[in-house]
Image: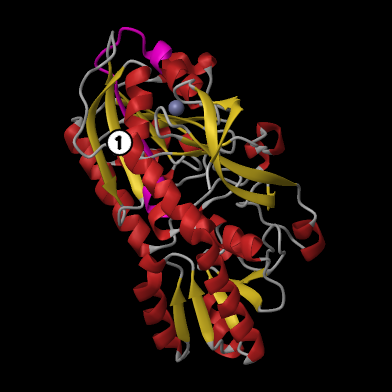
Amino acid sequence: MMQKSTSYFCPSCRATGMSIFYKASNVPANSCMMFSNHEEAVSFPKGNVILGFCESCGFISNVAFDPLKLDYSSLAPEEQGFSGTFNTYAQRLASRLIQNYDLHGKHICEIGCGRGDFLALVCQQDHNYGVGIDPSTVSGGVESEASSRLTFIKDYYSERYANYHGDLVICRHTLEHIHDTADFIGTLRRGIGNKFNTATFFEVPDITRILHEVAFWDIYYEHCSYFTLGSIAKLFRLCNFEITSLTKDYFDQYLLIEAKPVNQKSKIVFENEESVEQTAMDVENFVLHSQEKLSFWKDQLSQIQKKKKKAIVWGSGSKCVGFMTTLGVKEEIEYIVDINPRRHGKFIPGVGKQIVSPEFLKQYRPDTIIVMNPIYCNEIKKMMDDMGVVADYIPCS
Ligand SMILES: [Zn+2]
């Protein structure tokens, strides 16, 4: 059950008190890391996850988060571009932004751009100019026709880059890594100043789905901030932005918010914003069902071991690390499959299992494939059929 603690305050609305509802101990401090051997992978620093819910704005935060445990500058920039499903989505999103904001010869700034793949997509066809800011970025990391119009700054976003907003600020899958969310959005707003034509676009994972599906594998250390449409909208309004669009996309897994700077608190509230009471109910649901969900998966794992089945997990990203760590997977699963060739042969933090290629399964012949993200099930099945690999599929849902 939820337990209110006044030792914490909400990083989004600054209200005192967070209701604690979920704890996971000794979680790898960064689930995106990969290691060249098992020993390094299991000894990687760990932290605790203690999720608190704000009864004033509906925001959810890891109150035990320590940013010092994370160093994004030593990370290789993340890529998700190996999946057709994901690429189609990124293309569609880029086209939508170009159309909505008439982005031709415009200046675009992307905070948390990674390698710069998305920034390049937005800039390449329409002769836009892009600045990407990210502690893990590398100049020339992305091959694009727009390369000569792209600038990359290897740093964390701060007051120092206030002048880089341009016509559109894009920030995808970054805000969930920021603990002091109001400080971050406030810094951006101060940087934009009175340039009221600057548009902003943010994309973050949706906590509502995680709560509904009791998807404990989607809770990990580097994600210290969890949003609903309602709580992200409140944060933007508190920081003097007016919301112009508020939607879900990518199979309802992501929240998309578009906003423009205003001088005073906007009163525009969208119909799809959840109330704090609704989110409180979703949190209660998560608390109520998380034990049975964990038991279900522990039972699946013991069946695998009892029947001496060969099981693999498909997808070596953060979901997989969250899944394996929370369940304390040992001998039940030996390998993890990933389509990204840069991950092959490496080991994931926490349980320290090795990542292999899909081709490896031709000889390994797994009986069971646990699919971390069910939206890739069809893609995976087709690949396995083509290789003549017959297995049972268990989607994580
Ligand atoms: Zn709050």
Q: Amino acid at mark 1?
A: Ser
How many marks do you count on the picture? 1
- Mark 1 lies on a secondary structure that is loop
Classify residue 258 as left or right of residue 284.
left
Q: Whole-percent x and y of residue 27?
A: 67, 51
Residue 190 painted magenta? yes
Q: How would you rate the neighbour count of disc 1 (Cα within 10 Å): few for under 14, some for 14-19, many for 20 or more?
A: some
Image height of 48 relative to 341, above or below: above
Q: Quadrant of ligand 1?
A: top left
What colour scheme governs how the chains and residues are painted in the rendered image of this protein? secondary structure
Q: Which region is colored magenta?
A: 189-210
Image height of 306 relative to 12, above or below: below
Q: Which residue is mark 1?
A: 275
Residue 118 quadrant:
top left
Is the CB of mark 1 within 8 Å of ligand 1?
no
Image height of 378 relative to 390, above or below: above
Instruction: Pick the quarter of the image with the C terminus.
Output: bottom left
Q: Whole-percent x and y of residue 88?
A: 30, 57
Image height of 139 relative to 300, above or below: above
Residue 361 painted magenta? no
Residue 309 quadrant:
bottom right
Q: Which residue is found at the position 46% from the left and 77% from the top? A: 394
Q: Which residue is found at the position 46% from the left and 86% from the top? A: 392
Q: Which residue is found at the position 51% from the left and 66% from the top? A: 293
Q: Whole-percent x and y of residue 306?
A: 65, 89
Q: Whole-percent x and y of residue 65?
A: 64, 36
Q: Which residue is found at the position 54% from the left and 68% from the top? A: 338
Residue 80 visible in image = no
Residue 185 visible in image = yes
